[in-house]
Structures are given as structure tokens and as C-alpha cells.
């Protein structure tokens, strides 16, 4: 009997390969439930770490992955999923999430869990813009007036300043989370990316 080795969050990485072309399409994570869903439905399911929920790939975009087979590696800690994609596998619109040549990498960035959440959050907000969900608060903000989002940023910034000025670190941290979220929504609404802001900060650091 093959044994799957899940991490401390109950997850295992899954590499997705095009069943016909053999191109590597993407990397995501699965848990027990998403594996069972995949085997039962014939569609590939993952577990979204940013949303902390099961993720039916293609449910909002229409770019489904039709499951064909799954192979466990020799250590039992990675799954190779062979699937037939119906549309681009990457949220950027590319067929594959693997696009950049390693030899062209000029900068290394350490993605600690505390910082990677920012990119995960931003990606979810971007996804809500591209594939709206009626019941989503983020979708309602993005579908409304820019002034409403801007006002939320101003309100949260005021709460952050007040909590920080009065020495309440717990409330400061909570309010900062709200501020970051609404600031990200305003960025997405204006077509500004994390990379755009990073370029500005990098220029200031080297200046």
C-alpha cells in the first residue's frame, strides 16, 4: 500500500502535467478531501491555502482540469497529476504557470510564511476582479465606486494610527490587516500590482 506523507497542515504538493503534451502546467496543494473529490468527480480539486478551503480548479474561470491519472513519487510526499486542461492553467492567462528561465533570475527573495500571505491575498483579490463571485465582499467592493474603496482605506488608516498612537499592539495588528486588505483592493481596482510598488521601493532603497 502506498502512503501519502502530508505536511503538518495536512497538505501535499501536486504537480500538474498535460496528459498529452507532457508540459508541466502548475503546482498546487491537495489534502485528503481534494484528492477524494478529484477521484470521485474526474475534475482536479486542490486546497487553497490563501482561502483555507477546497478549490475546484476552473469553477470561476471555466478553465477546468480534467483528471486522467495520478502518480505518487518514491518518497510519498509529492503527487504528479496528469490532466487535460480546458483553457489556460495559469491565472495570468498562460497555458503554464512555469514561464521564466531560471538563468534569467537576478534577485533572490525569501518567501517566509509571514510575507507570502501578502502575495496570496493579492492574488485572491485579483481573481475576484477577473472572475466575480456574487456573494464575495471583495467582488462587491471591486464592482462599486472607487470612492467607496478609497474611503475604507482612509477609515482603516485612521484606526491603525489611533491604535498605534495609544500603544495597543494587538488592535494595531488587527487594524493593519484590514488596512492592507483594503489597500490591496484599491490597488487591483486601479490596475496596480505588487511588482509596481516593489519597483518604486527598490528604486528608493538604491537611491
Image: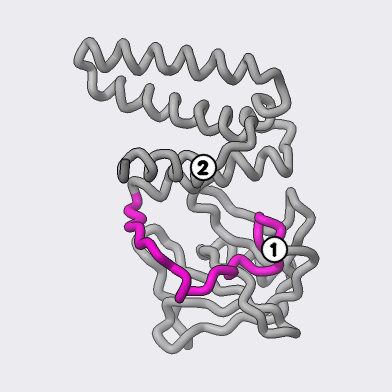
Q: Which residue is under mark 2?
A: 196
Q: Which secondary structure dominates the residues rendered in magenta?
A: loop
Q: Is residue 186 visible?
A: yes
Position above or below: 166 against 60: above
Closest to the camera, between mark 1 and mark 2, is 2
Mark 1: secondary structure: loop
Q: Which residue is under mark 1?
A: 94
The magenta stretch spans which residues? 89-113
- 3D distance between C-alphas at marks 1 and 2: 20 Å
User: Residue 201 versus residue 42: which sits nearer the camera?
Assistant: 201
User: Residue 191 versus residue 132: which sits nearer the camera?
Assistant: 191
Q: Is residue 121 visible?
A: no
Measured from the top left, where is residue 2 in percent x and y?
Answer: 47, 85
User: Residue 14 versus residue 102: which sits nearer the camera?
Assistant: 102
Position of the C terminus by quadrant: top left
Measured from the top left, where is residue 44 in percent x and y?
Answer: 67, 66
Q: Are marks 1 and 2 in contact (CB under 8 Å)?
A: no
93 part of magenta stretch: yes
Residue appearing at x 75%, y 85% in the figure: 20
Mark 2: secondary structure: helix
Amino acid at each position: 500500500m502506498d502512503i501519502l506523507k502530508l505536511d503538518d497542515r495536512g497538505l501535499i504538493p501536486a504537480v500538474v502535467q498535460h496528459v498529452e503534451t507532457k508540459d508541466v502546467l502548475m503546482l498546487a496543494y491537495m489534502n485528503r478531501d481534494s484528492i477524494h473529490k478529484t477521484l470521485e468527480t474526474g475534475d482536479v480539486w486542490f486546497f487553497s491555502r490563501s482561502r483555507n478551503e477546497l478549490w475546484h480548479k476552473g469553477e470561476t474561470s471555466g478553465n477546468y482540469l480534467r483528471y486522467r491519472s495520478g502518480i505518487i513519487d518514491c518518497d510519498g510526499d509529492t503527487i504528479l497529476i496528469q490532466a487535460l486542461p480546458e483553457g489556460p492553467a495559469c491565472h495570468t492567462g498562460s497555458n503554464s504557470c512555469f514561464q521564466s528561465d531560471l538563468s534569467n533570475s537576478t534577485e533572490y527573495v525569501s518567501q517566509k510564511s509571514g510575507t507570502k500571505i501578502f502575495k496570496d491575498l493579492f492574488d485572491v483579490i485579483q481573481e475576484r476582479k477577473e472572475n466575480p463571485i456574487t456573494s464575495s465582499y471583495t467582488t462587491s467592493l471591486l464592482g462599486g465606486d472607487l470612492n467607496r474603496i478609497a474611503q475604507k482605506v482612509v477609515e482603516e488608516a485612521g484606526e491603525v494610527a489611533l491604535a498605534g498612537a495609544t500603544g495597543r499592539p494587538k488592535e494595531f495588528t488587527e487594524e493593519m490587516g484590514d488596512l492592507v486588505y483594503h489597500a490591496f483592493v484599491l490597488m487591483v481596482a486601479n490596475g496596480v500590482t505588487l511588482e509596481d510598488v516593489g519597483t518604486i521601493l527598490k528604486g528608493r532603497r538604491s537611491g
